[in-house]
Image (cartoon, rainbow, N blue to C red):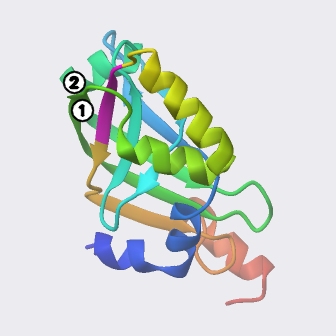
């Protein structure tokens, strides 16, 4: 059995959770088909917090279909990938979610974050705080932890047998 908290403490997981790579949020649309969207996130020690305007189509769907998968990965070899799954909790808020402000600072810098989030707040944009407490976590680092279907081939290729 995978110990989710141990996986999340791993160096690769911590690198990705602190990165400026957007998360890829996968969920099931109301017609049963899959959807994946890039989204800013903020790591809160044991939870991934994302945010979206309340009128975003994904918010209503996530309220009724809260089971999700989230992937965070870098874009250079050797690829590092953090795979998460769980059920999200949605909280509708007035104004900008604090974790969205923190994420904006990390992704785009403090000046942009201040201007952007002030604009959103002044425009009366309501937000949904989307919180994931992962129940599953796995790392692929293409160095010692490989996609399961290719583990034998990677180990052989790298002389790790």
For the C terminus, the image quarter is bottom right
Task: Give the percent coordinates (x, y) of residue 141.
Answer: 63, 70
Local crowd size for mark 1, using a 10 Å CA cut-off: few (<14), some (14–19), many (≥20) = some
On the picture, is 96 further left or further right than 106?
left
Dot 1: what SS?
loop
Mark 2 vs mark 1, CA separation in Å: 6 Å
Q: Is residue 145 shown above or below 79? A: below
- The label shown at residue 66 is 1
Asked if residue 143 can be seen in this view, the reply is yes
Q: Quadrant of residue 160?
A: bottom right
Q: Residue at x 29, y 56 (%)?
A: 134
On the picture, is 142 further left or further right than 10?
right
- The label shown at residue 41 is none
Total count of labels: 2
On the picture, is 15 further left or further right than 90?
right
Q: Is residue 9 magenta?
A: no
Q: Is residue 18 shown above or below 117? A: below
Mark 2 and mark 1 in contact? Answer it, CB < 8 Å.
yes
Q: Is residue 127 magenta?
A: yes
Task: Check disc 2 and report the residue beneath it.
Answer: 63
Asked if residue 2 can be seen in this view, the reply is no
Q: Residue at x 41, y 78 (%)?
A: 9
- Viewer-proximal residue among 121 and 30: 121
Q: Residue at x 33, y 20 (%)?
A: 126
Q: Is residue 60 shown above or below 152? A: above
For the N terminus, the image quarter is bottom left
Q: Residue at x 44, y 53 (%)?
A: 42
Q: Quadrant of residue 100?
A: top left
**Predominant secondary structure in magenta?**
strand
Dot 2: what SS?
helix
- Magenta highlight range: 126-130
């Amino acid at each position: 059995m995978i110990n989710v908290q141990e996986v999340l403490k791993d160096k690769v997981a911590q690198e990705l959770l602190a990165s400026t790579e957007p998360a890829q949020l996968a969920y099931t649309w109301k017609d049963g088909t899959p959807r994946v969207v890039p989204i800013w996130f903020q790591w809160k020690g044991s939870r991934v917090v994302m945010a979206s305007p309340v009128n975003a189509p994904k918010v209503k769907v996530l309220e009724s279909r809260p089971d999700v998968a989230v992937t965070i990965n870098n874009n250079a070899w050797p690829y590092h990938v953090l795979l998460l799954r769980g059920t999200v909790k949605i909280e509708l808020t007035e104004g900008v979610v604090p974790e969205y402000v923190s994420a904006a600072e990390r992704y785009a810098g403090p000046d942009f974050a201040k201007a952007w989030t002030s604009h959103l707040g002044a425009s009366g944009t309501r937000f949904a705080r989307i919180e994931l407490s992962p129940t599953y976590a796995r790392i692929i680092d293409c160095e010692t932890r490989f996609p399961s279907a290719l583990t034998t081939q990677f180990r052989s290729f790298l002389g790790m047998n």
